[in-house]
Amino acid sequence: MAIHLLRKHLGRSSLLLSCLASIAPASATEPLHDQIVVGSLSGHIFPSECCWMPLPPSDKLAAMKRAEFPGCSAIGGPVGVFEYRDRKLWLTSLYKCSGAFDHRQVYPALASPAFADWLSGSYTLALGPCGHDPRLGRQAYAHKQKITVVNGVVTAMSQQDDDGAFCAAQDRKKESHIMREHHARYDKVIALHEAGRYAEALALIEQQLAEIEREAAPDRSRYFMPMFQLKLLLDVYPPARAAMMALRDAQAARLLAGERFTGADPAPVKDTFQRTDRYSLVVGMNNDLGDARSTYDIFRQLAARQPELAGSHAWQALEAMIAVGDFALADRYRRPPLDQLPNVNATARDLPLFPRPRQAPRLSADLSSLVKDVRIGMAVLRGLGDPAGADALRAALLDGLVSDELKEFARRELDEPGAIGREVVARQMAEEDRQRAL
């Protein structure tokens, strides 16, 4: 193949092209590149001079390279797989067309991983490969760094221009494609539900949830639609209840085994607010199932195994504690019921209780949260034999609110939990209808 075709495919420097041409006949397949892992990122590592990362001399390695080439269209293998850690480079394995293999097959005297003290020079770390950029004629990378190495120790590191714009565009395309796939599945479940094909709808929902669990760190939003569609099946298809209970039990088991978050990676690799907490998922399913006892029992087990984590989740279990009659435990974990009262009154001076459509109902949410704390406090006091204290707490709430509107809706929320939320929805829908009629 002409050398200009290699230039178009690889987009490497003329030095690298010359090396490739001198080593073997040109190939249309991307060569095998030395690999590198840096923390949670992976990619390739390139020497400043042609062509691959140096490895200790070995007749066996040379023989493997000769044997590899005729049956592998990607030249270069075996290559090194390295890790950057503790300001050093480590050889963790070797890689050829058929995959990674233990470097001790070639270097039995080396440790695993092996400190790469034979490396000295300048190298480029190209991390986060995000696809072939036709404008550059090569693989694009989200991050690039130049490092200087002396006997395996990284003595200097500097940032280089990366392909961030191309990678960001690729990410947006990928996310858009994934969202289209998700919505297509949601629509299919709806169609199956409406057609009365409940078993097929349930199977598709279970497949979606299993796929979400295999993602590294699924956001909370990923669960919303499949769980909502599963909830709708509860009323029309009895096996859906058994399926939800099985899903709940599986999530609870992994939670109690120490896996706080859903996904293949249990560590909080991103903002924990966005991660899906297993206990929150369990509580949501138990609310749909009407199973307060399960929420309570799982919390007790969590408290015995991971008391700090249980403490952060106690607010989600308080109503279940009350439902099963463990008022002493609820009293232990509940927060002072009027703590949010000053904040609600301050917010009420600046924001309406029922905002216009598409505006966040912040005051409504804060008032609902305050009333819930008071309602739980009243239930605990009554359960512990102090009805007078419960009545006094109710009075303190209503007396402490700064406006008649707040008092009225707090009164309604105490007597009919969810009343404020229903009023917010009703008013916003009415306003939207009014605007459409104009």
Image (cartoon, rainbow, N blue to C red):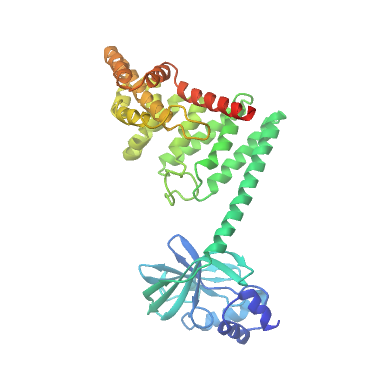
Residue at the extreme right: 195
Does 187 appear above or below 38?
above
Image vertical order of residue 374 relative to residue 181, above or below: above
Direction from residue 57 to residue 372 in the image, left or right: left
Q: Is residue 63 above or below residue 371?
A: below
Percent x, y for residue 318?
A: 37, 27
Q: Residue furthest front?
A: 438
Looking at the picture, does residue 237 appear above or below residue 412?
A: below
Give the image quarter of residue 129. Answer: bottom right
Q: Quadrant of residue 186?
A: top right
Answer yes or no: is residue 164 visible.
Answer: yes
Q: Is residue 431 left or right of residue 350?
A: right
x then y, percent, for residue 11: 60, 76
Name the image quarter holding residue 115: bottom left
Q: Residue at x 60, y 29 (%)?
A: 435
Q: Residue at x 32, y 38 (%)?
A: 307
Number of marks in picture: 0
Spot the residue most to the bottom. 22
Residue appearing at x 43%, y 27% in the figure: 353
User: In the shown orientation, is residue 170 left or right of residue 375?
Assistant: right
Q: Quadrant of the N terminus?
A: bottom right
Q: Position of residue 433 (x, y in %)?
A: 61, 27
Tell me, yes or no, if residue 300 can be seen here. no
Q: Residue 306: image x %, image y %?
A: 34, 40
Locate the C terminus and report the quarter of the image it occupies.
top right
> In this orientation, which residue lies closer to the viewer: 206 or 20?
20
